[in-house]
Amino acid sequence: MHIIHRGIVNKSYKENCLESFRASFKKRFGIETDIHSTKDKRFVCFHDFTLKRIFKISKSIKNINYEDLKKIKNKNFQIPPLKEVLKISKKKFPIFIEIKPLFNKELLSNLIKETRSFKKCTFISFKHENIYNLLKLNSKLSVGLSFSNKSSIKSILKSSLNKKIKYLILDKKFLNSRRIQIINKEKYYYTIKNKKEFLKYEKDNNLIFENL
């Protein structure tokens, strides 16, 4: 199974926007999306902690109410609420929800409630505390731990022993590691950036890709 990174089907589509997610679902792929919480505790799909890179505004998502965030646009691109992304998936396609900040118990509980009826959601995070705290709230959730290219193989192997962790989300540098490949756990490798890479690895691996 392969997942489109931030819904970037190809270079014509922007990251983490509804148009891109619709195109991904139309091609029958699942998506990976990043989430933050606004000041008034609404979940939105956006990668960065601030609006500076995309909108040239030096404000943090966590300090803006959702209604104010809705007014911010860049070439007709608006930051979508997670609810809307879930809705357009029609419960048919996998959604990997990457929690970017460290969420408190209240936010994690709200996130579980918001996604409750969507059985194809998997929660992932580089901040592993998010995942372990989610499991404390509901041990049956589908979850994964994300690891960067700086993570040690030792730390990945240790984390893989936790039976409640369904997925390991790994930098593509680990594709060539025999010690990683033999881990008896579902693994996804990111970010496969072009068709050449995709064709090289797609047969035997689960990939998080873009620009195919």
Image (tube, rainbow, N blue to C red):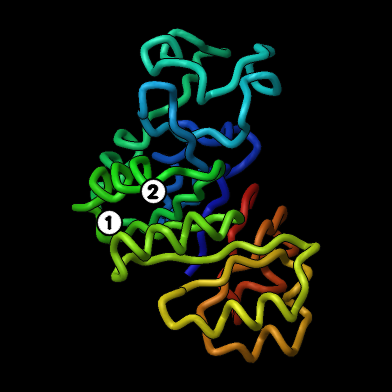
Residue in the picture at 43% in, 22% down: 39
25 in relation to 204, above or below: above
Q: Position of residue 36 (x, y in %)?
A: 48, 35
Label 2 packing within 10 angstroms: few (<14), some (14-19), many (20+): many
Residue in the picture at 39% in, 18% down: 66
Q: Position of residue 119 (x, y in %)?
A: 25, 60
The numbered dot on residue 25 is 2
Amino acid at pointer 1: Lys
Q: With 127 as the anchor, is 177 left or right in this view?
A: right
Mark 1 and 2 residues: CB-CB less than 8 Å, in contact? Answer: yes
Circle 2 — which element? Answer: helix
103 in relation to 43, above or below: below
Decide which of tag 1 and tag 2 comes sooner along the chain. 2
Farthest-out residue, left: 117
Q: Which residue is mark 1?
A: 92
Q: Position of residue 177 (x, y in %)?
A: 77, 83
Residue in the picture at 29% in, 40% down: 88
Label 1 packing within 10 angstroms: few (<14), some (14-19), many (20+): some
Q: With 23 as the anchor, is 109 left or right in this view?
A: left
Q: CA distance from mark 1 to mark 2?
A: 9 Å
17 or 160, nearer to the observer? 160
Circle 1 — which element? Answer: loop
Q: Position of residue 178 (x, y in %)?
A: 75, 89
When asked about the image quadrant of residue 180, the answer is bottom right
Amino acid at pointer 2: Phe
130 or 21, nearer to the observer? 130
